[in-house]
């Protein structure tokens, strides 16, 4: 494994992903982890991430004591580079001139990291402090006009530092630098492949569950589908999937889960039609958080009842395991610990309560989203499932601004189906992260259709691009596509006489409207 030491939120995850793209397993550890504990994980290499702090600030995170004496090849990036320099007797200076964005480095000595790459390279920088003198024993390998030590290395001790961000795609030779560090600097082998991941996960699940029974809530989303398929491969009929139709699904969604997923996996499926129950509970509710809480609560009740039904009320052996599609980012964000406390309330529909009497099986908890998709493909799941865009557990309930009614759901379902159909026809499904359509149910505007005045509702198109849903940008869909969607929705969906486009990034907007 390669340990990525986290000095600040988003940087570490991106680095960990890039290492895995080099087919080397990586995991993120907090910068507060003692060096001995890191060593116990028997890392082949350590990477120190960037971070928002300045090494001068009181309380700024430092490298764990003794880290650079472990004999493990280590690469410092940005803040990690500065931490390394300072800890080993170099100097870090505070500059008036920041370097944010694109910059050009001049390679002053190729060293190990830059061997075979051009003398001048475009890189991505984001720093104010800089290393003004490398520690003794180090060779300076790169500089910019502003940064005298943009790269340094002490090959003998296996210590490397770069001021720029090799993990960012704008850094021209970033992946090359990372690969050189991993393969040449640390002797890692590219053997972390999808086949290995599937085989290892299947074996781990078999070991954990043995001959007991498990259930898995299917949401129709990628994560739960892949988790279920993986566990199905491991324990076959001992698994039952539960699919709750809460009436807030999109057009054709329930059928898709029932048909496509079962066809692909042969899994036992237990479908609960709970539409009335959910819609009754949501009657008249307009507050977004209240909606979410109601949906979450009802979901749990339905789910628990289903679990009892599956084995029979007084079964000698109740279902012992619950399969969850928890992903690595969820684990990292909740502190990287272990156990049930890591279930995020966002993760499933409103999250499952901790007093639910199950032991958790989380076969995807070391994986990122794109890896989950690759595992899904490896398991033979159809593209319609593997490449589905994310859809929130509370479903269309949080895409109707105002109270949720059957009529409104029907309207939104039709508009949403048109938008999705046209996006697919334009071949843009994979370019767009997600494409919510939002019904402003309490807003009316005047229109003219045919020869008559209308007084209908607007819908908002919310296509976004994103890498991980933490941040997002509005998708620049082609105008002619937007026009087709607009024309079709206003022609085909009664009640809608206006189509608008949301051009807000996240932040400040969130992806969903509620
Ligand atoms: P926001 O709206 O916070 O959404 O930018 C970020 C991502 O999370 C999805 N989302 C949810 N997913 N249960 C889920 O499973 C939820 O309660 C939930 N709320 C938002 C949203 O669709 C987007 O992908």
Image (cartoon, helix red, strand yellow):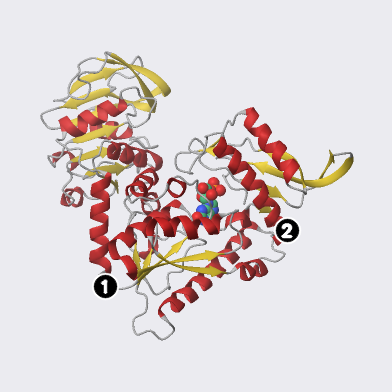
Dot 1: few (<14), some (14–19), or many (≥20) neighbours within 10 Å?
few
Numbered tag placed on residue 211 in the rendering: 1
- Front residue of 403/344: it is 403
Contact between labelled residues 2 and 1, with CB atoms less than 8 Å apart: no
Relative height, residue 138 to residue 332 (above, below): above
Work out whether mark 1 precedes mark 2 in sequence or the reverse, and give the earlier one. Answer: 1
Is residue 177 left or right of 71 when viewed as pictured?
Answer: right
Report the Cα–Cα distance between label 1 and label 2.
46 Å
Is residue 252 left or right of 483 when viewed as pictured?
Answer: left
- Horizontal and vertical percent position of residue 489: 70, 42
Which residue does the numbered mark 2 point to in the structure image?
407
- Horizontal and vertical percent position of residue 270: 47, 69
Residue at x-position 56% and y-position 37%: 425
- Horizontal and vertical percent position of residue 106: 29, 14
Residue 43 occupies quadrant: top left
Dot 2: few (<14), some (14–19), or many (≥20) neighbours within 10 Å?
few
> Is label 2 in a helix, a strand or a loop?
helix
- Front residue of 385/338: it is 385
Judge whether residue 338 can be spotted in this image: no
Residue 21 occupies quadrant: top left
């Amino acid at each position: 494994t390669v340990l990525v030491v986290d000095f600040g939120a988003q940087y570490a995850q991106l680095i960990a992903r890039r290492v895995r793209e080099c087919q080397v397993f990586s995991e993120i550890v907090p910068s507060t982890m003692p060096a001995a504990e890191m060593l116990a994980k028997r890392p082949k290499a350590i990477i120190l991430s960037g971070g928002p702090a300045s090494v001068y600030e009181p309380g700024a995170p430092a490298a764990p004591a003794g880290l650079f004496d472990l004999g493990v090849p280590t690469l410092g990036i940005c803040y990690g580079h500065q931490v390394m320099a300072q800890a080993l007797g170099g100097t870090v200076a505070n500059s008036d001139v920041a370097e944010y964005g694109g910059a050009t480095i001049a390679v002053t000595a190729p060293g190990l990291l830059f061997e075979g790459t051009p003398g001048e390279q475009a890189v991505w920088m984001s720093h104010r402090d800089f290393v003004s003198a490398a520690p003794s024993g180090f060779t300076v390998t790169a500089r910019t006009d502003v940064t005298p030590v943009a790269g340094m290395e002490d090959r003998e001790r296996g210590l490397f530092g770069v001021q720029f961000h090799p993990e960012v795609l704008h850094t021209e030779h970033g992946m090359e630098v990372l690969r050189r560090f991993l393969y040449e600097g640390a002797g890692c082998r590219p053997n972390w492949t999808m086949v290995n991941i599937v085989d290892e996960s299947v074996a781990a699940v078999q070991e954990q569950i043995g001959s007991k029974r498990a259930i898995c809530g299917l949401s129709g989303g990628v994560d739960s589908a892949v988790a279920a398929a993986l566990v199905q491969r491991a324990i076959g009929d001992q698994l039952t999937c539960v699919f709750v139709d809460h009436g807030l699904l999109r057009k054709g969604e329930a059928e898709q889960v029932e048909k496509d997923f079962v066809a692909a996996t042969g899994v036992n499926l237990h479908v609960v039609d709970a539409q009335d129950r959910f819609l009754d509970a949501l009657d008249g509710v307009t507050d977004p958080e209240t909606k979410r809480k109601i949906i979450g609560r009802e979901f749990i009740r339905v789910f628990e009842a289903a679990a009892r039904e599956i084995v029979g009320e007084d079964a000698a052996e109740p279902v012992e395991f619950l399969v969850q599609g928890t992903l690595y980012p969820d684990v990292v964000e909740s502190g990287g610990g272990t156990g049930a406390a890591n279930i995020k309330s966002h993760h499933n529909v409103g999250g499952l309560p901790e007093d639910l009497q199950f032991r958790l099986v989380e076969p995807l908890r070391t994986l990122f989203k794109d890896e989950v998709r690759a595992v899904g493909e490896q398991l033979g799941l159809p593209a319609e499932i593997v490449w589905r865009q994310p859809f929130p557990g509370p479903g269309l309930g949080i895409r109707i601004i105002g109270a949720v009614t059957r009529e409104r759901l029907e309207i939104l379902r039709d508009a949403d189906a048109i938008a999705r159909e046209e996006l697919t026809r334009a071949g843009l499904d994979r370019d767009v992260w997600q494409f919510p359509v939002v019904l402003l149910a309490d807003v009316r505007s005047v229109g003219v259709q045919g020869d008559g005045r209308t007084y209908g509702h607007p819908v908002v198109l919310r296509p976004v691009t994103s890498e991980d849903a933490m941040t997002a940008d509005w998708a620049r869909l082609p105008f002619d596509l937007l026009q087709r969607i607009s024309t079709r929705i206003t022609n085909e969906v009664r009640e809608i006489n206006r189509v608008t486009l949301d051009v807000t990034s996240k932040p400040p907007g969130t992806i969903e409207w509620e």
